[in-house]
Image: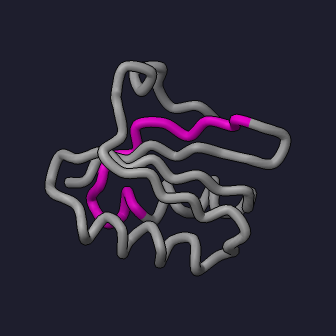
Amino acid sequence: MSRRAESRQIEANEVLDIRGEVCPFTFIETKLKLEEMKSGEVLEVITDHEPAARDVPKSVEQEGHEVIEVLKTGEREWRITIRKK
């Protein structure tokens, strides 16, 4: 499910830990955080909800943001790296 390896060199401006949250709250929290950020900044989202690892990237792309990477980092944990439009 990894999108690109380039994120290893990209440092996140903000980290949003939404472990314990479920859809649709995972996307709502992500969207609210992105609204606080400046264009071009990078947000790292940490989730333990598998549907969010699929749905959050789709939703933020529909909003026009760039999904740099979706990486499974543990048995039930994912890191989603997003660049704000």
Q: Nearer the viewer, residue 44 or 62?
A: 44
* Residue 64 is a magenta residue: yes
- Where in the figure is residue 56, as x and y percent of width and height? 53, 61
Which portion, as a residue range, is magenta? 60-73
Q: Residue furthest left?
A: 39
**Quarter holding residue 61:** bottom left
Left or right, 85 with respect to 43, comes to left
- Where in the figure is residue 1, as x and y percent of width and height? 64, 36
Q: Nearer the viewer, residue 30 or 15?
A: 15
* Residue 38 is a magenta residue: no
- Where in the figure is residue 58, as x and y percent of width and height? 49, 58
Residue under the point 51% across and 71% down: 27
Residue under the point 48% across and 36% down: 69
User: Residue 15, relative to residue 36: is it above or below?
Assistant: above
Q: Residue furthest right?
A: 75
Residue under the point 73% across and 61% down: 49
**Quarter holding residue 36:** bottom left
User: Residue 43, relative to residue 72: is it above or below?
Assistant: below
